[in-house]
Image (cartoon, rainbow, N blue to C red):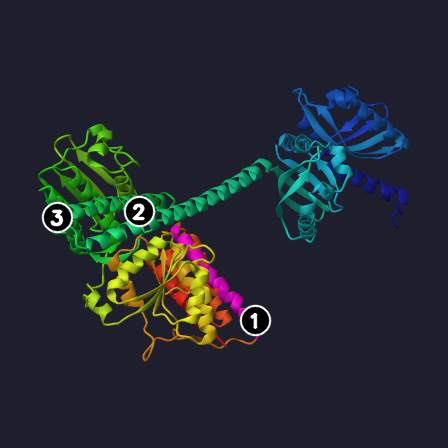
């Protein structure tokens, strides 16, 4: 007997029951808050997540209309949303707040669907309280930020801006969002802005730039921007910071720097002019004294000569002190590094001061501690200047007794590279309260000292600054009536080279006599200077001719052959620079022997001396020019015509690439300009600029076919790294010579 067959309805009932059980399990286990609510406003069924999130039991939640759990501020929106559900509309992503049992409201995110035939709404809610709090926190930062925060679309319009925009620019959020971003950008900055914006749209990452934005009153403010694109949203998140005050400060600093540079240039020009105006007549005064001293004088006349020679030398020393102080304070004075013998330097300084000391009946001596290195590397001339200042003061303020100079390794430092010098005297001494002020400019221990002993009070101020350049310090110890001891420390290198052999010196006058009569052209607008040079050289058989300015000098050179030209640099009509350039140009055209030209200048600026060399001068002498100095220069540089006469300096022939021949002259002119720029930078101790110029010279020489320029540039760059001013000058001189001798074919 077969079993009875089940009907289709009998089979569907167990399946339906099983499906309901599965759905019920999901309902009970869900982390979201699931519920069924009636059109009457009451919950009908709720899962356990409600009790877990809000703390109420299901009975408490279903016993009251659900609107009572809604935040009062959200009830109207919730009621409206419920009316939409009853009308058959589904709800997606509706947010409101529900009261928890502890009285705290929690944010809910709702999705709901109505079933009109059952008069029920099936809904799912998710607790988004933490997310909302995070949003609120970010929004507070967004609203309170002093920076201008915004979100812009790829269409170039802003979507959201924070209040900082209105505070800084004056426009409302609606005004800002209604116009493309670029409309607010300064016309001069728009091209840059558009380029940056396009890069951002192309996905090149964060955009950073500065630009000016228009404010509501029509003025512009500087903004610094950082912006990041989000391609999936087609949005750009940006932060702008008002940097107007910073920009104004930068512009002010730049303006002040330019004013300071202009003031420094004016100061340098003033010093150059004053030096020229003072040294030019002083050259005549000192030179005339030298000439008078060589004549037959009686005792009274000789005393007169010595008086005005002393006064002139004191004036020259004062001028040199002022110029030294100016260069130190402006940072243009640098140390020249070379090897020297310490004992020899001390001996020469003591010997020089002994002449004055013996006139007062006091002795000057020196001693060197056994551990002191004998040969050093540093600036011997600046060390000598400090020692002469201190020994000179000691002699000046000592009426009887002695002056003792002593050198030893600094006992407070283990290395022998730092030496301590002391100059002790038995003079009038210095009050304790004045010991700290005597190193200030124009300061002496007592105003009466100036009347009694003379001096300007510049010597110690200059010494202090020179010692500081040598990485040392200077101080004094003294008591009135018991003498004074001045100490200073200085850092040196240890010389590695042996003492060079002494050069054989040819007697000056004999050397000149052996040359025979010389034809010399003296070019100077000062009648007194022309007279002085004429008197200097008349006893040495020289045949002198004179020119009052550069124009006359050029005419004379073109008509006559000279053994030597003495050329003043600052003259009316045509200065010495232009005259020298024209003379060299004419000699080149005519294939004539180059006539040595010695520049005579009262300037103390290295750049002016270099300008003279660049113009074609053979050498340069600074005024005031002493007789022996002039004679030695004439002996060294004079060239006689005839057999064995000197010709053009040997040319350095460079075969240029035909494609570069047209631009090489301009390239070489730029390098000549670099020579002047480096020397000007050296006066300011601007080693960074010198290094950059050396790097540029090194990097361009080979490309134009001048490997020697590349080598010199590399040497200048290395010397700048080592802050070696002597090496820089040497390499600049080498570059200047190369540029003068190079012949491009």
Question: Which mark is on residue 662?
Answer: 1
Left or right of residue 662: residue 75: right
Q: Position of residue 152 (x, y in %)?
A: 72, 42
Name the element at disc 2: helix
Q: Is residue 258 above or below residue 653?
A: above
Q: In percent of the image, x 32 and y 56: which residue is there?
A: 531
Magenta stretch prevailing secondary structure: helix
Tell me where residue 544 appears, x and y as whole percent: 33, 65
Instruction: Pick whichever of labels 3 and 2 is earlier in the sequence.
Output: 2
Gap between marks 3 and 1 measured at Cα: 64 Å
Q: Which residue is mark 3?
A: 366
Label 3 sits on a secondary structure element that is: strand
At 15% from the left and 41% from the top, the residue drawn is 395
Tags 3 and 1 touching, CB below 8 Å: no
Label for residue 320? 2
Q: Is residue 214 left or right of residue 598?
A: right
Above or below, 637 relative to 654: above
Q: Nearer the viewer, residue 548 or 677?
A: 548
Q: Quadrant of residue 540?
A: bottom left
Crowd tier of the residue under label 1, counting other residues whose Cα lies within 10 Å: few below 14, some 14–19, many 20 or above: few
Q: Answer above or below: position of 44 versus 411.
A: above
Q: Is residue 588 visible?
A: yes
**Residues at marks 1 and 2, CA–CA distance in whole angstroms:** 47 Å
Residue 405 drawn at (x, y percent): 14, 45
Which of 697/684 is in front? 684
Q: In the rendering, at what x and y percent does residue 9 appear?
A: 89, 42
Which segment is the magenta one? 659-683
Residue 137's label in the rendered image is none
């Amino acid at each position: 007997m077969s079993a009875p067959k089940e009907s289709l309805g009998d089979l569907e009932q167990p399946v339906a029951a099983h499906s309901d059980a599965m759905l019920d399990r999901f309902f009970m286990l869900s982390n979201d808050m699931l519920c069924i609510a009636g059109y009457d406003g009451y919950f009908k069924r709720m899962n356990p997540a409600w009790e877990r999130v809000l703390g109420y039991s299901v009975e408490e939640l279903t016993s009251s209309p659900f609107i009572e759990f809604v935040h009062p501020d959200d009830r109207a929106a919730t009621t409206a949303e419920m009316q939409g559900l009853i009308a058959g509309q589904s709800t997606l992503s509706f947010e409101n707040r529900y009261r928890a049992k502890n009285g705290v409201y929690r944010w809910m995110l709702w999705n709901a669907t109505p079933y009109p035939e059952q008069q029920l709404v099936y809904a799912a809610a998710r607790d988004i309280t933490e997310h909302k709090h995070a949003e609120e926190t970010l929004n507070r930062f967004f609203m309170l930020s002093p920076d201008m925060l915004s979100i812009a679309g790829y269409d170039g319009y802003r979507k959201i801006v924070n209040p900082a925009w209105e505070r800084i620019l004056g426009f409302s959020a609606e005004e800002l969002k209604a116009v493309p971003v670029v409309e607010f950008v300064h016309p001069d900055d728009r091209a840059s802005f558009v380029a940056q914006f396009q890069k951002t749209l192309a996905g090149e990452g964060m955009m950073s730039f500065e630009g000016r934005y228009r404010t509501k009153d029509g003025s512009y403010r500087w903004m610094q921007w950082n912006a990041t694109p989000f391609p999936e949203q087609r949005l750009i998140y940006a932060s702008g910071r008002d940097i107007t005050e910073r920009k104004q400060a930068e512009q002010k600093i730049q303006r002040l720097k330019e004013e300071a540079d202009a003031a420094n240039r004016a100061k340098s020009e003033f010093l150059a002019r004053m030096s020229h105006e003072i040294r030019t007549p002083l050259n005549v005064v000192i030179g005339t004294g030298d000439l008078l001293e060589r004549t037959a004088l009686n005792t009274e006349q000789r005393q007169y000569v010595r008086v005005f020679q002393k006064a002139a030398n004191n004036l020259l020393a004062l001028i040199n002190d002022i110029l030294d102080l100016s260069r130190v304070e402006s940072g243009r004075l640098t140390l020249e590094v070379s090897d020297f013998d310490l004992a020899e330097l001390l001996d020469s300084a003591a010997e020089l001061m002994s002449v004055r000391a013996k006139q007062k009946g006091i002795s000057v001596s020196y001693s060197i501690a056994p551990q002191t290195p004998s040969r050093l590397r540093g600036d011997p001339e600046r060390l000598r200047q400090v020692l002469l200042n201190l020994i000179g003061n000691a002699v000046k303020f000592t009426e009887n007794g002695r002056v003792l100079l002593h050198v030893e390794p600094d006992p407070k430092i283990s290395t022998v590279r730092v030496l301590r010098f002391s100059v002790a005297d038995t003079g009038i001494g210095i009050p304790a309260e004045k010991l700290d002020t005597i190193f200030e400019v124009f300061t002496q221990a007592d105003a009466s000292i100036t009347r009694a002993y003379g001096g300007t009070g510049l010597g110690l101020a200059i010494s202090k600054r020179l010692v500081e350049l040598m990485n040392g310090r200077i101080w004094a110890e003294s008591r009135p009536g018991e003498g004074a001891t001045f100490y200073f420390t200085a850092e040196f290198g240890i010389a590695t080279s042996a003492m060079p052999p002494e050069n054989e010196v040819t007697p000056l006058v004999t050397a000149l006599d052996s040359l025979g009569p010389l034809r010399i052209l003296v070019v100077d607008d000062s009648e007194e200077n022309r007279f002085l040079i004429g008197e200097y050289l008349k006893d040495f058989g020289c045949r002198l001719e004179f020119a009052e300015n550069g124009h006359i000098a050029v005419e004379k050179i073109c008509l006559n052959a000279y053994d030597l030209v003495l050329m003043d640099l600052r003259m009316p009509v045509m200065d010495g620079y232009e005259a020298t350039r024209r003379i060299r140009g004419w000699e080149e055209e005519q294939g004539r022997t180059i006539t040595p030209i010695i520049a005579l200048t009262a300037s103390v600026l290295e750049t002016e001396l270099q300008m003279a060399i660049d113009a074609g001068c053979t050498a340069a002498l600074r005024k005031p020019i002493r007789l022996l100095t002039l004679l030695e220069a004439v002996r060294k540089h004079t060239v006689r015509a005839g057999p064995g006469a000197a010709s053009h300096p040997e040319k350095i022939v460079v075969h240029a690439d035909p494609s570069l021949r047209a631009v090489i002259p301009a390239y070489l002119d730029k390098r000549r300009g670099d020579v002047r720029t480096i020397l000007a930078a050296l006066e300011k101790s601007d080693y960074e600029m010198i290094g950059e110029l050396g790097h540029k010279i090194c990097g361009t020489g080979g490309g134009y076919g001048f490997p020697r320029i590349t080598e010199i540039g590399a040497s200048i760059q290395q010397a700048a790294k080592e802050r070696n001013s002597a090496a820089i000058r040497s390499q600049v001189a080498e570059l200047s010579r190369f540029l003068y001798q190079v012949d491009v074919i």
